[in-house]
């Protein structure tokens, strides 16, 4: 029996990759006959509208949780505190107006924006948090996704997992300490606005607090966590998950194949190389990795590569560099990813969740060169499930060795094919849509 029409409000931050991950969820709900409206930072609204979604830009959803301070003295600290409270009052008033005007059946939050939840809290309207990253819930066999550790169920393996969690706890304690110091000295910290919004809305934040030792991946007891991954892609756990939530599958779609206008010369194996969409933040390191990959590909007889960068300046520098080596290597900026992905024999990725899911759906083994955030953890999952390899020291020698192994060993392609079938099952069974429909009707999801 077809479910009734429901309205979903999606809140996304200014990381474009988060929207790219969530648009698959939104598309599935729309296909099922529901309405989806995105609320995002104003500078992102045009891009989301171009993708065919209803969208409203909201000026305070830019992820900036702190007041811009100019100098310091006792008077400016007091003024900053007042500014934080005034901003919280403004956010609460606008949040309530947005909810009253749209009145969704369910609010869908990016975890990076969950601190705004009290401002949008409306009687009779529940919320869920949809994590684009692996589940960050502690377990004796599962390291945090910030770590490239591949876990083993041994005494040593469990010790190493606990060690990784200890590192995260220490970093988180340092973050909390900095917040306390900033509150005392400057009158506000990264956490001030969150607390001010909760206080202004009469929300008991301390009672609902459930956040793990990673400041940007927020979690609340009353907000179920939906994980935008297949449970089978995670590491096996030693215990069951007791909190409210569900794995809803990758929710990723590959665009139709269009033959690329340009291909590297030759007919040897083709490697698709893309190290992410935020290369500007790590330009020097990214260039080093790309150059090492160019050298490694050049030394593999007949091997070809297409490198897709996210920055025209990187493309210019790499094009000059690759021209010295071979016409078997093509460097482009912002290519149509799916076109090359369909015809590649191997994918080199930074380990971002979207890139990994697309590679699996295209049936391609992967070499992961992780940078930060969840990329090390995704890279570890690639290795654990036999979907490819990881390279933490990407020089020419190491890269050549790993690339050759991945190109010559068919076992990786077989494992990717099996995981692809698992991914497709989530859509075949409409798991994502069913979980969100139930959540909109007040049925709490359970792992």
Image: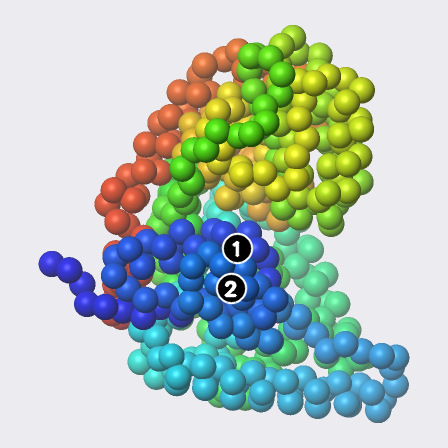
Residue at which label 1 appears:
18
Q: Which residue is mark 2?
A: 12
Q: Is residue 300 above or below residue 163?
A: above
Residue lying at the far left in this picture: please name it. 1
Location of residue 265 by image quarter: top right
User: Element at badge 1?
Assistant: helix
Q: Give yes or no for contact between labels 2 and 1 (Cβ–Cβ under 8 Å).
A: yes
Left or right of 163 in this view: 207? left
Q: Is residue 405 above or below residue 77?
A: above
Q: On the picture, is 375 further left or further right than 441?
A: right
* x 56%, y 12%: residue: 267
Does 245 appear above or below 9?
above
Q: How many marks?
A: 2
The tag on residue 175 is none
Identity of the residue drawn at 60% across and 76% down? 60
- Residue 321: give x, y in percent of width and height: 80, 26
Q: Quadrant of the N terminus?
A: bottom left
Residue 399 location (% of width, % of height) = 68, 21
- The location of residue 101, given as percent across then percent down, is 39, 84
Q: Position of residue 39 (x, y in %)?
A: 48, 70
Q: Nearer the viewer, residue 5 or 178?
A: 5
Q: Look at the image and name its color scheme.
A: rainbow
Q: Residue 43 is drawn in which quadrant?
A: bottom right
Label 1 neighbour load within 10 Å: few <14, some 14-19, many 20+: some
Q: Is residue 174 left or right of residue 206?
A: right
Residue at 54% in and 66% down: 45
Q: Which residue is at 35% across, 50% downward?
A: 248
Q: Nearer the viewer, residue 338 or 223?
A: 338
């Amino acid at each position: 029996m077809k479910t009734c029409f429901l309205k979903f409000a999606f809140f996304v931050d200014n990381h474009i990759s988060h929207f790219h991950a969530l648009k698959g969820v939104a598309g599935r709900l729309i296909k099922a006959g529901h309405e989806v409206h995105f609320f995002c930072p104003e500078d992102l609204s045009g891009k989301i509208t171009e993708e065919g979604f209803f969208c409203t830009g909201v000026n305070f959803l830019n992820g900036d949780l702190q007041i811009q301070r100019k100098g310091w003295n006792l008077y400016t600290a007091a003024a900053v505190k007042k500014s934080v409270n005034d901003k919280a009052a403004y956010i609460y008033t606008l949040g309530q107006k947005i909810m009253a005007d749209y009145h969704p059946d369910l609010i869908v939050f990016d975890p990076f924006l969950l601190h705004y939840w009290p401002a949008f809290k409306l009687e009779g309207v529940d919320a869920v948090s949809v994590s684009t990253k692996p589940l960050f819930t502690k377990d004796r066999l599962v390291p945090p996704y910030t770590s490239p550790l591949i876990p083993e169920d041994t005494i040593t393996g469990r010790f190493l997992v606990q060690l990784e969690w200890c590192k995260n706890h220490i970093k988180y304690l340092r973050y909390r300490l900095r917040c306390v110091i900033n509150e005392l000295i400057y009158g506000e910290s990264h956490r001030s606005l969150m607390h001010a919004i909760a206080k202004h809305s009469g929300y008991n934040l301390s009672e609902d607090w459930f956040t793990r030792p990673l400041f940007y991946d927020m979690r609340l007891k009353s907000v179920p966590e939906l994980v935008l991954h297949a449970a089978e892609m995670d590491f096996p756990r030693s215990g069951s998950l007791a909190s409210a939530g569900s794995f809803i599958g990758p929710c990723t779609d590959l665009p139709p194949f269009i033959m690329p206008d340009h291909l590297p010369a030759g007919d040897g194996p083709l490697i698709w190389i893309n190290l992410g969409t935020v290369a500007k933040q790590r330009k020097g390191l990214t260039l080093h990795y790309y150059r090492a990959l160019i050298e490694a590909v050049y030394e593999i007889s007949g091997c070809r590569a297409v490198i897709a960068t996210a920055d025209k300046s990187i493309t210019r520098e790499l094009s000059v560099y690759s021209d010295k080596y071979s016409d078997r290597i093509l460097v482009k900026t912002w290519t149509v990813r799916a076109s090359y992905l369909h015809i590649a024999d191997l994918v080199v990725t930074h380990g971002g969740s979207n890139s990994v899911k697309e590679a699996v759906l295209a049936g391609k083994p992967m070499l992961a060169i992780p940078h930060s955030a969840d990329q090390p953890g995704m890279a570890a999952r690639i290795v654990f499930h036999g979907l490819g390899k990881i390279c933490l020291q990407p020089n020419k020698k190491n890269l050549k060795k790993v690339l050759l192994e991945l190109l010559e060993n068919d076992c990786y392609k077989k494992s990717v094919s099996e995981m692809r079938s698992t991914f497709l099952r989530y859509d075949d069974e409409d798991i994502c849509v069913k979980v969100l429909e139930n959540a909109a009707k007040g049925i709490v999801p359970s792992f």
